[in-house]
Amino acid sequence: MINKTHLTDIFFDLDHTLWDFEANSFATFNQILSDHNFPFETATFMEAYSPINHAFWKLYRENKITTEELRFVRLQKTFEAIKQPQNAAMINTLSNAYINQLSTHTHIFEGTIELLEYLKPNYRLHIITNGFENVQQKKMANAGLAPYFDVVLTAEKAGVKKPHAVIFEQALSMAQTSASKSLMIGDSYEADIAGAIVLGMQAIQFNSHNESWHNHCPIVDNLAEIQQYL
């Protein structure tokens, strides 16, 4: 259960928590694949891409691959998985187009604005994200999320990725608050929840992609449920 007696600051993850990464990726690839007249449906591509992307983001979070490898290999492996292998030039073209267009799409999870409107009068709201600085700022601005948040800290700016303690510590320092007064809301147990709890923050997991159940913090299936805790 959440103890909100001394709670002053709430930190959110962005992708898969407020900003609907899967919906926006689908919209982006739908346009890109259409532009290049690929002979398969976007849904076929995304069925392969989503788990591959998730796996490579885990490797990136663990510093086992670089940004460039993440962006290239996830596409290379997806095309191989659907038996439509592409050369390096085409993959680089598609990767660049994806990065340039992704932030222009504005799908957010149902209940996002309602939750932020509910919390904003009583708490200071912040973002801690493993996404890239330029892309994340554009996502927030285009989706109308930027005005709700005070501190926005990306892994690129922090120099480390969640769940590393340093990124949480930097965010707390920037917000001029402490772990005991703070709560983290995110979709990933490994990156968001475990990382926050280790520092003494409270946490709520938004289980947007069906991670395994645990009893380390409340778990919700939709954003509206969070209001009952805060």
Image (spheres, grey):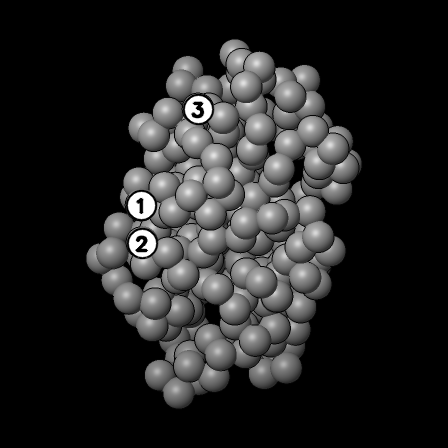
Residue that appears at 76% across and 37% down: 117
- 2 or 1: mark nearer the eye: 1
Q: Amino acid at mark 2?
A: Val
Question: How far across and down, in percent of the image, does residue 206 sit?
Answer: 55, 32
- Please tell me which of labels 3 and 1 falls first in the chain: 1
Residue 173 image offset from top left, x and y in percent: 42, 43
Label 2 or label 3, whichever lies nearer to me, is 3
- Residue 39, placed above or below residue 199: below
Depth check: give the residue in front, 104 or 11: 11
In the image, 27: left or right of 86? Answer: right
Dot 3 corresponds to which residue?
180
The residue type indicated by label 3 comes to Ser
Q: Earlier in the sequence, mark 2 or mark 3?
A: 2
Place of residue 24 in the rendered image (x, y in percent of width and height, measured from the top left)? 63, 58
Q: Which residue is mark 1?
A: 166
Tell me what residue is drawn at x 64 percent, y 77 percent. 34
Q: Which residue is mark 2?
A: 160
Kind of element beneath mark 3: helix
